[in-house]
Image (cartoon, rainbow, N blue to C red):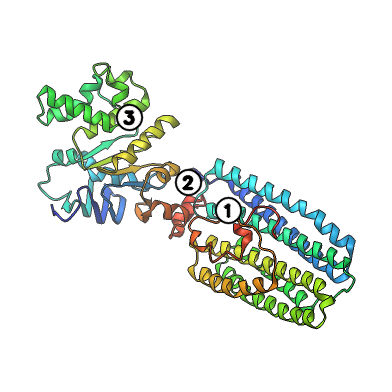
Amino acid sequence: MTQSQTAAGGGRHFHDQLAALQDRLLAMASHAEELVDRAMAALRARERALASAVVEDDAVLDALELEIEQRAIALLALQQPLARDLRFIIGTIKVSSDLERVGDHAVNIAEATLRLLEIDTPLDPRPELAELARRAGAMLDDALDAFVKGDGALGRDVCRRDDEVDAMLEGLFRVLLTHMIERPASISAALQLLLVGRNLERVADLATNIGEDAVYLAEGSRSSTIMATTRSRHTRRSLVRRSAHLPEPSTVYCSSWPGTFDCCEAHSFRRHRHGRRGRAA
Amino acid sequence: MSAAIEQGEIAARGFSFWYGEKQALDDVTFTIAPRAVTALVGPSGCGKTTFLRAINRMHDLVPGVRQSGALELDGAALYAPGVDVVALRQRVGMVFQRWNPFPRSIYDNVAYGPHINGVRKGDALDAMVEHALRRAALWDEVKHRLRQSALALSGGQQQRLCVARALANRPEVLLLDEPASALDPVSTQRLEELLRELRQSLTVVIVTHNLQQAARVADQTAFFFMGRLVEAGRTEALFTAPREPQTEAYLTGRFG
């Protein structure tokens, strides 16, 4: 079939633009991952300058999100894409929003590091935190890979691994709680480390979102099994949140994908998707 | 006709069609839901127009054509011996790509069908003309100039006049072959609104090259390729997540 016989939304120009959109998304992804790595490096090294640089560099992600959004909207308006192209462009908008929030969590970790440096009775970063960071980073990496390749199986695998990260955060909470009970002077520092852990767990949640988007891109339908896993996860984790007395991020609106309104409850721990735009708590 | 079947349901079962040696349709099986808009899409030469025209036997006078399999309207075979083609075309109206009003008055264009079908009384005919023009969303624009030439209307109005002319026979099915391809965006929008209203009372089948138009107006979409029906289903599902790789390739412009 010749090009003239194909549908609207075709054409080399359009496909070049789609490829360019994907390139920008990958650039944003590597920047987001790098920001989390640098925040964790600042925590390990207790480096004030490194932590401050993370806070400043978040602006790059904000700009990239805006650029990707503008490119995607232009493609939707001018090319009227369909089928997989449509799912890809919608997915790109969602993934870039998730990546922007990954950056926010990196900033939160850097800010916790800065506060830790002010505390007189420091506490060494727990090895569990490094493991959490490694797993969250690997999930993010695989989720992006799954999205770009349209690999539904890999997307599902990322979603499944989120439970392991949740369990690790719970373990970290118990360890830090023991510290706080034994040595009340360490409470301030322990709380900051717990906050770091929670932000890493949120990064894993965002990777899970991207994994879900990859499944949708590949298969054209939202998986109910993934949603069900999320529901059970919510029940267990809210326990951690309540006992840790961590602040609740405010929920203003639901920007979730059409048809997932019934998952608001299931996702309610994942405020990044339902919460206010901008800095996550 | 079975009473259990809703009026205006078209069913094809293993329907094939040939122009001489050339096969235009190959074993097409699907059901066009009554009281809904169904869009037929696909590249040029895929058989969608052949299928549309087969529904009211427009090919009958073309030399060398033949068909096999079944094509039914409300359970009655359209190609069975003894089918009254004139009666069939009263039940199945058709509107073409290029509007083709008769070079007569607006009134005469709409009154033509009922008139040759025996409605001769002025009042009854007036009422039928008004009803058809109202259903075609044209009444308010032409009610004060019914005796003027139809050719003085704009393109969009002439196309809606053709719809009114088809509706005057009170058909169960309305077939449209690329009805908006030569209309400006505003006229196109009016025509599409009209189709959405009409589906409440009749079965609408539209052939279109404009995928966005199919997406906007159709409840059901069927994708044809090289004479075969590749995929048919709810428009929303077909356009966002088609089942067949060929449909996916066509919609995303990655064919060949």
Chain letter, disc 1 residue: A
Q: Residue at x 33, y 39 (%)?
A: B195
Residue A88, quarter of picture: bottom right
Q: Quadrant of the C terminus of chain A?
A: bottom right
Regarding mark 1 in the picture, which secondary structure is present there? loop
Q: Is residue B107 above or below residue B19?
A: above
Foreground: A83 or A63? A63
Foreground: A252 or A134? A252
Three-letter residue code for mark 2: Ala
Residue that numbered label 2 is attached to? A7
Task: Say whether residue B122 is left or right of residue A180.
Answer: left
User: Marks 2 and 3: which is nearer the front?
Assistant: 3
Chain letter, disc 2 residue: A
Are the residues flagged by discs 2 and 3 in contact, CB closer than 8 Å? no
Residue A11, quarter of picture: top right
Residue that numbered label 1 is attached to? A253
